[in-house]
Amino acid sequence: MSKEKISILGSTGSIGVQTLDIVRRYPNRFQVTSLVAHSRWQELAEQARSFDVESVVIGDERYYTQLKEALKDTKIEVMAGSEAINHVARSYRSDTVVNALVGYAGLHPTLLAIESGKRIALANKETLVVGGDIVMGAAKHKGVEILPIDSEHSAIMQCLEGEKRRNIRNLIITCSGGALRNIPREELASVTPEIALKHPQWSMGAKITIDSATLVNKGFEVIEARWLFDIEPERIKVVIHPQSIVHSMVEFTDGAVKAQLGTADMHTPISYALLYPERSEEAMEEFSILNYPTLSFMDVDREKYPALDIAYDCLGKGGTAACTMNGANEVAVAAFLAHKCGYLDIVETIRYALRNATFVAKPTIDDYDDANKEARELARRYLKL
């Protein structure tokens, strides 16, 4: 059997590194052909050598010369910039594209990979948050599988295996509550990036960790679930589950609830997406339910976490609303991490952008590009950047 050829977009990030762990475990199953990173050119060069890839792309063109020099004694093709990322996404050299890019930058590569008929292992949630309608439409048209890497959506997918769609009552997405779960509402104004980055369970990149603290991330997962599983927003529920052991659940019409449990380790959903419809033959980390005698669940405090309702509102409005939310959030989170705004300014920036942005009800990809650009400009205006 020939090896499945894989391109990894975002190979030096948390998801990318763990994807390469899975590839190492299945050397006869997978071959990595292309790797893409934003700015970590040293790590990218090391990965390229280790996996003997055909090509690499550094998104930030300022690091092209260093990367080129680091790989000058190899036959690896070195490229830079967004057009090069798009080239890799649609390249004939891969069967599967793992999209672990951060933010809006993941949308165009996903669409190009779909157009080229590739299987998509999707960790870039913004792809569906921003353009879920056109992305899922394109995937259906091309007969392309989109397999979620998010632990929550992987859990839902696993719970739905073998079930009839008409028997689904609700999807229940769990969340830890993030680093600020135990901080009272009245103290949020004084939260610093250092505090918000201390996630109690998951080890993730800085941007997604802040999104977890605000619950913007969970709102985006609601939008993702709507498109991935073609289900009405009112049938997607969110509950806080501090232990992060139940990754999500599905409630059925007969009252039964199926849940997927496991350690807070992304290797499991990554391997499920890569190997589907098979499963990995052994776990990266063993799990025992006896180590977790108490599992608790609670409702989300909507006043403490207003971003969740904003995401539901954007989903209900449709069009470019979620794109505006995402663009404004990206700017605000970057500003917060750089100590250029306060924690509470993140949600206020989103609200300002949504109030002032142009709305397009039935957007094209060009409309999404325009909405993303406008949202960022509005966010910078609000934050006086």
Image: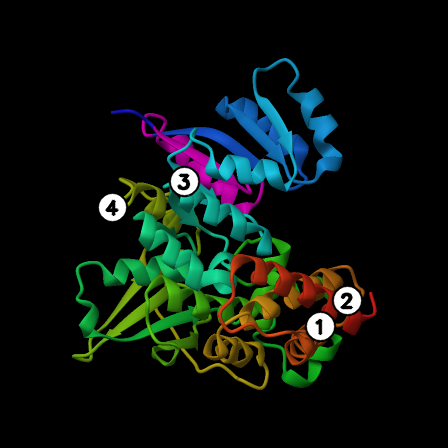
**Quadrant containing the C terminus in the rendered view:** bottom right
Give the distance between the C-alpha atoms of the residues marked 4 and 1, in whole angstroms.
42 Å
Horizontal relation, residue 211 to residue 223: left or right: right
- Dot label at residue 116: 3
Q: Kindly identify the residue that appears in the image at 29 percent across and 24 percent down.
A: 2
Which of marks 2 and 1 precedes in the sequence? 1
Residue that badge 1 annotates: 343
- Amino acid carrying label 1: it is Tyr
* Mark 4 neighbour class, 10 Å CA radius: few under 14, some 14 to 19, many 20 or more: few
Q: Is residue 290 visible?
A: no
Q: Nearer the viewer, residue 59 or 188?
A: 59
Instruction: Select label 2 or label 3 by which is in front.
Output: 3
Residue that badge 4 annotates: 277
Give the distance between the C-alpha atoms of the residues marked 2 and 3, in whole angstroms.
36 Å
* Mark 2 neighbour class, 10 Å CA radius: few under 14, some 14 to 19, many 20 or more: some
Q: Secondary structure at mark 3?
A: loop
Q: Kindly identify the residue that appears in the image at 55 percent across and 53 percent down.
A: 203
- Amino acid carrying label 3: it is Ser
- Dot label at residue 380: 2
Give the distance between the C-alpha atoms of the residues marked 4 and 2, in whole angstroms.
44 Å
Which of marks 1 and 3 precedes in the sequence? 3
Q: Secondary structure at mark 2?
A: helix
Q: Which residues are magenta?
A: 4-29
